[in-house]
Amino acid sequence: MDYGKFLFQQKKKSHDSRKKQKIFHVKEVKLRPKTEKHDIEFKTKHIERFLKLGDKAKVIVMFHGRELAYTNIGREILGKIADAVKELGVIEQPPRLEGSNMTMILSPKHN
């Protein structure tokens, strides 16, 4: 067998397999515990747009100083966002506290 032909076929196989892959981008949305209701709704519309485009959304609630004592407020905010986008996306990673940030990852629903 010709070695050059073999290399060409290997290259073609790897190219075809990469062509069929679906690339997910992770879009981030950052909030604070004192974020107003209207601003949360505005950010939720951004998350809905990201999920419609097929991207994942990472929602971060940032706590500064003494706000860290009120992590329940962050969980409520993330819960409201998850309820608002449940038709478009599913929770891939539930809310969890990482240092002074609480993160949740939403991914688009696959029909």
Image (spheres, rainbow, N blue to C red):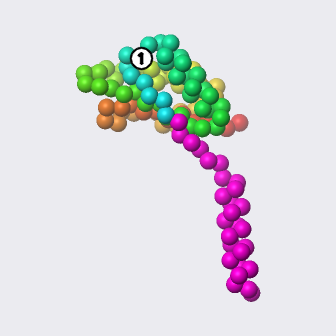
Q: From the viewer's perspective, tell me whether residue 86 is left or right of residue 28.
A: right
Q: Residue 88: horizontal and vertical position, in percent?
A: 64, 28
Classed neighbour count for the residue bearing mark 1: other residues with Cα under 10 Å, few (<14), some (14–19), many (≥20)? few
The verdict on residue 11 being magenta is yes
Q: Quadrant of the N terminus?
A: bottom right
Q: Which residue is mark 1?
A: 35
Position in image of residue 56 (x %, y %): 56, 37
Out of 43 and 82, give the one closest to the viewer. Answer: 43
Residue that lies at the very extreme toward the bottom in this rendered image: 1
In this rendering, would 25 be left or right of 104? Answer: right
Residue sitting at x 60%, y 26%:
48
**Residue drawn at x 66%, y 58% as measured from the top left:** 18
User: Is residue 3 shown in magenta?
Assistant: yes
Dot 1 falls on a residue whose secondary structure is: loop
Q: Amino acid at mark 1?
A: Thr
| Residues shaded magenta | 1-27
In the rendered view, tell whether residue 49 sits above or below residue 1: above
Residue 107 x %, y %: 57, 36
Quadrant including the C terminus: top right
Going 62% across and 35% down the picture, which residue do you hit?
108
Can you tell which quarter of the image residue 55 is in? top right
Is residue 109 visible in this depiction of the protein?
no
